Amino acid sequence: MFFLQIPALLITLIAYNVLALVNNDLINQVLFSFPLISGASFSVSVSDLLLAFGILFLTIEVIKATRTNTTSVIDHMLSMVVFVAFLIEFLTLPFAGTSTFFLLMLMALADVIAGFSVSIAAARRDFGGSIVN
């Protein structure tokens, strides 16, 4: 169950860092390509795969955000730490200054916002709170 408390987007952060540190050119390498009926060629690169996994992991994180137990607070804090790590790397490391990394960072930000938004909405529902204008 400990694995469920680790933010899933941390996996994409680690994968990107490992690939960039091993060989930064690996991120742009095409994994496979095939022709479409339209005549266009559909190619998938490692960066495309990282983004696809990021979207999948973001979906998992949003589903996890609907939990209203004590571990959800820890999960939200860890998600914030992952976002801050993305942000620091994006601003300071040359290999992280790519559109792929930026989009992964935006997914981490969306995770943080969704997590807190869902938790606040659930707390209002459970405790009968209302928005004060």
Image (tube, helix red, strand yellow):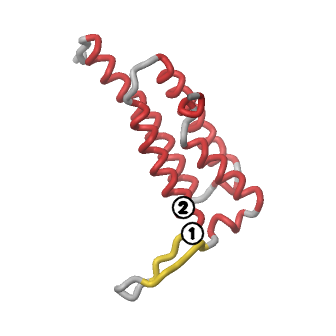
Residue 47, compared with residue 59, is above or below; it is: below
Residue 18 in the image: x percent, y percent? 72, 53
Residue 91 appears in the rendering: no
What amino acid is labelled 1 in the image? Ser
Tell me which amino acid carries mark 2: Leu
Residue 72 x %, y % = 47, 24
> Which residue is denoted by mark 2 in the rendering?
49
Image point (56%, 57%), residue name: 50
Q: Which mark is residue 45?
A: 1
Q: Quarter of the image containing the N terminus? A: top right
Q: Residue 95, image x and y in percent?
A: 69, 57
Q: Secondary structure at mark 1?
A: strand
Q: Please report contact status of discs 1 and 2: CB closer than 8 Å, yes or no.
A: yes
Total residue callouts: 2
**Relative side of 56 to 17, left or right:** left
Residue 23 vertical placement versus 66 (above, below): below
Please say whether residue 2 is visible from this viewpoint. yes
The spot of residue 88 in percent (x, y) is 64, 41
Q: Nearer the viewer, residue 1 or 92?
A: 1
